[in-house]
Amino acid sequence: MDYAQLLKAAAHGDDQAWSELVKALAPRVHGLIVANTRDPDLAEEITQSVFCTVAERVHDYVEQGRLEAWVFRIAMNRLRDEMRRRTRHAKPVGDVGFPEAQQSGREDRPAYVRTDDETASALWDAVRDLSPQDQEILHLRHVAGISFKTIAEMLDTPVGTLLARHFRALKRLRAQLGPVFPEFELSEEDQQ
Amino acid sequence: MDQDYQDTRLDDTDHRLIDRLDTTPPSPIPAGLVDRVLQASMPALMAGRARDVTRLRWPVVVGRLAVAAMLGVAVVIGFWSTPSGSTSGTFGLPLTADLGDQSSTAMLASGPFEWRDGPLLTLLAVKDVGYEQALGDLETVVHTVGTGRMNMLGLVDDEGPHDRVEAELLTVTSVAGGAS
């Protein structure tokens, strides 16, 4: 059953269908928010809020094959609202960082091998150094797992523009990662 | 991830980086996240379902009111357009007050009243009946109905007892209306 069918069933009283929909989408929404805020608690709060909104408007959705776009658009709007609110209250956004990265203990190891957590931390730290536009396309595509087609619907942007933006973001990320991850270093051709 | 557009400009290193991004989440999914989201969203889901039921009821109510209004209008139109000759009993009697002050010649000559000719002729026939005679007829009718001996009324072959009683009452009412 696809997402739209699950939502329709949920709207007509099928709690199991709603459960399946939440199971499929909530971790992706949470991942997208936490990638932007670096605050897992806030990300969970926003994720809950997003699904409350979807639940309240369960009958408003008109099937056009865009349910994913609808849900993630709500999530992005909620995220922007939260960022605006935080800016207004002059709170620094996400100084929490990743505890794993702060407690790596790297210097104590004679032959250092990067852990998965450290790899993740270094990778996403490099993403955070990119422009907001580059971050957005990488988060939507590789954290939330949204197809280019759906992102195009969400952002009301042509797919060709998104592909070009994604391509440039990857190259910039490789340039950032080069010193830490030699395997991703840009070729001379790319650097030109 | 579903079928999607492929960028042919990406090289092998780009694809390796994409694989790494896809398989390395920036933060682990908290344990019990789905359960907590479900718990938080269930009341909203119930409200959403209820809201739709409420929203659906309004058109039904409005539709029923519209049908009722149309029926009402149809009944009124039917009442005024049905020839009173086709009605039974005293249904057409309100016309008698209007007829009482008109000359029979004028009434018969007037085109628009053609459809009323049936009851009109009946009314004209009884117009000259005296009040006492009509009262006597009424007494006869009441007595006959009261004693249950309706067969005593002089009936013609195709006239039932009720028709007879109604005819008598029509006479009395018409005369009484004319007298007042």
Image: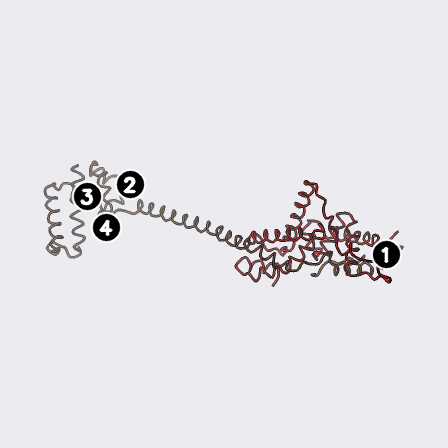
Chain colours: A red, B brown
Circle 4: residue type = Ser
User: Does mark 3 fall on the same chain as mark 1?
Assistant: no
Residue B89 placed where, x, y %? 22, 49
Of discs 3 and 4, which sits in the foreground? 4
**What chain is tagged by disc 4?**
B
The residue under label 3 is: B123
Image coordinates of residue A105 in percent, x first then y, are: 81, 58
Three-letter residue code for mark 1: Glu
* Gap in angstroms between the C-alphas marked 3 and 4: 14 Å
Q: Do the residues indicated by labels 2 and 1 lie within the same chain of the protein? A: no
Q: Earlier in the sequence, mark 3 or mark 2?
A: 2
Secondary structure found at label 4? loop
Residue A185 is labelled as 1
Task: Evaluate whether label 3 is on the same chain as label 2.
Answer: yes
Q: Is residue A142 left or right of residue B61?
A: right
Q: What's the mark number on residue A7?
A: none
According to the picture, the residue beneath numbered tag 2 turns out to be B112
The single residue placed furthest to the front in the displayed view is A108
**Quarter of the figure with the N terminus of chain B:** bottom right
Which label belongs to residue B88?
Answer: 4
Same chain check for tags 3 and 4: yes
CB-based contact (under 8 Å), mark 2 and mark 4: no
| Of pointers 3 and 4, the one earlier in the residue sequence | 4
> Mark 3, mark 2: which one is toward the viewer?
3
